[in-house]
Image: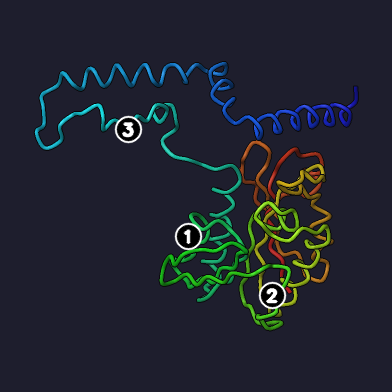
Amino acid sequence: MNRHSQFKAVRFLRCILVWINGLFPFLWPIRGLFKNFNYIRGPLLYIRDYVNFSRTPKDPRFPLHFINSNPCFFDRFDTAGGKPRHYFLQDIWAARRIFESGVQEHFDIGSRIDGFVAHCAVFCKVKILDIRALPDLDQNIQFIQADATDLKNIASDSLSSVSSLHVFEHIGLGRYGDPLGATNLDKAIQEVTRVLAPGAPLYFAVPIGIQRLEFNAHRIFGVETVIELFKTLKLAEFSAIDDQDNLVLHANPSDYARAEYSCGLFVFKK
């Protein structure tokens, strides 16, 4: 079996497992049980700790009552801090470049609020656009609810700094309640290109590797496809987060032609 056939076989098996997980989410604890037995160890250790704590000297300010129990069975097995795949390194990569650019106001389309947007809001004002509603967050964050395929309220050549990180792979697939359409991706590309000011940077990130559509989660782009989508702009930087979640600065695009699920980090300029 050649590599392409192996890849298709793995994707087919993964598709079956994803469907099973989506239809029967209660099976996840069973998977975890067979994986490392933490689904048994967690509750047992909780009972042990509860009994041992009850035997320690009492604090009348905080009496122990079982009815108030709030078990956290599995936190002890986690690492000291989370590092979401792609997002942690991607958000730092983009925020660092925006900070170094010295802009006072930045415009973002759909990126992670509790990572990238929060980073940028420390040193500049951020206008964020998303198709979903969002409550007020911070004095440095202004929210606009809109569809990225139609930025009619934004003038052409008007935005001096723009980003969209791990967003455009979802456009048109309905995952977030957005309108369905195979060509909606191209409409969004045209719009963001239109509103970008001459000479202004666009910080852009999407999954890269063997090109495919995983409906309705996302698309995986070939690097050359991304460059072609923004052919009216100049590519100023290509970096990447590889399949092992390592940040590779100023990467070689050809190294990611057969990647499974890497992340392309692009800086384009108009």
Quarter-of-image position of residue 167 = bottom right
Drawn side of residue 241 relative to residue 223, left or right: left
Percent of width and height locating residue 139: 41, 72
**Mark 1 belongs to which amino acid?**
His
Which colour scheme appears in the figure? rainbow
Residue 82 drawn at (x, y percent): 48, 40
Q: Is residue 12 left or right of residue 71?
A: right
- Residue at point 63%, 70% (across, down): 146
Tell me the CA gap for discs 3 and 2.
46 Å
Asked if the residue under mark 1 is in contact with the one under mark 2, i.e. CB atoms within 8 Å, the reply is no
Q: Quadrant of residue 69?
A: top left
Q: Quadrant of residue 47?
A: top left
Residue 209 picture location, percent across and down: 77, 44
Q: Nearer the viewer, residue 79 or 26?
A: 26
Q: Which mark is residue 70?
A: 3
The tag earlier along the polypeptide, 3 or 1, is 3
Which of the image's four quarters has the C terminus?
bottom right
x and y percentages locating residue 113 in the rendered image: 51, 58
Q: Secondary structure at mark 3?
A: loop
Considering every residue shown, the one lying at the far front of the view is 67
Query: Disc 3 residue type?
Result: Asn
Q: Between tags 2 and 1, which lies in front?
A: 2
Residue type at the position of mark 2: Leu
Q: CA distance from mark 3 to mark 1?
A: 32 Å
Of the numbered discs 2 and 1, the one sitting upstream in the chain is: 1
Are the residues at dot 3 and dot 1 in contact (C-beta closer than 8 Å)?
no
Q: Between disc 3 and disc 2, whose residue precedes?
A: 3
Disc 2: which residue: 151
Q: What residue is at 59 percent from the left and 31 percent from the top?
A: 25
Crowdedness near tag 2: few (<14), some (14–19) or many (≥20) residues, C-alpha within 10 Å: some
Residue position for label 1:
119
Q: Which mark is residue 98?
A: none
